[in-house]
Amino acid sequence: GVAAWAGTGSFALACSASGELFRTGGRGHLLGDPLSGHALVRGAARAALRAYDGVAAPTSLGDRLVEATGAARLSNLPASLQRLAPAELARFAPQVVAAATDGDTVAQTLIRDEAERLAELIRSAAVRADQSATTCRVGGGVLTGSALVRDALSDALGATESLRLVACDGARAAAQLARWVHDGTMPMAGWVR
């Protein structure tokens, strides 16, 4: 099957019929992780500061991030964000999604662009695994927490794409995996063990 994860970081994974795993993405917050919480906040802060400098379209992202982080003002946002570990920074991703939901076109474009990049990883993993599955299981707080983000990813995969997104509960998926490993019915049961 095919799976995609977008939480603090992101990656795509596909398993071939023989049980071989093909992973794409997951390169960390400095080199990738499209549509991850970290990528969304980093992109939002960049867009907000470009708007503040007068070189990009106005956006509500700056005000939202200043309020969420407790920065005194937008000019202090870089120092506030740069002190944070990737997971701490990623926790502000709901502010980006809220801005997009409220009609902020800069936030909407950011999410759409990040979704395109994650869709590329999903397609690549599926092709490498010779996987023609009709379902792509998705997990991670960014993808399971927002229908808007899932819809953006679904749109990025395209109407003609064979992959349909299905959000999965991490605990349920772990229980299913444990059952397959216990029963020995999963091709990778030995590897997981």
Image (spheres, grey):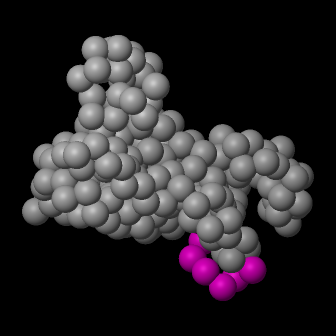
Q: Can residue 52 be seen in this view?
A: yes
Q: Looking at the image, which is closer to me, 131 or 44?
A: 131
Residue placed most toward the observer, 37 or 25? 25
Image side of residue 157 versus residue 41, left or right: left
Image-quadrant location for residue 51? bottom right
Q: Which residue lies furthest to the front in this view?
A: 190
Residue 68: image location, x then y, percent: 73, 43
Q: Is residue 138 left or right of residue 155?
A: right
Question: Position of 46 compared to 154: left or right?
Answer: right
In the picture, measured across the screen, residue 88 lies left or right of residue 180, that is: right
Residue depicted at x 19% and y 59%: 130
Q: Which residue is drawn at 48% across and 46% down?
A: 6
Place residue 147 in its image quadrant.
top left
- Give percent across and percent down for residue 54: 70, 82
State yes or no: residue 57 in magenta.
yes
Residue 151 seen in the figure: no
Asked if residue 175 is among those painted magenta in the image, a careful observer would answer no
User: Which residue is painted at 68% across and 65% down in the image?
Assistant: 30
- Which residues, given as a range, are shown in magenta? 53-59
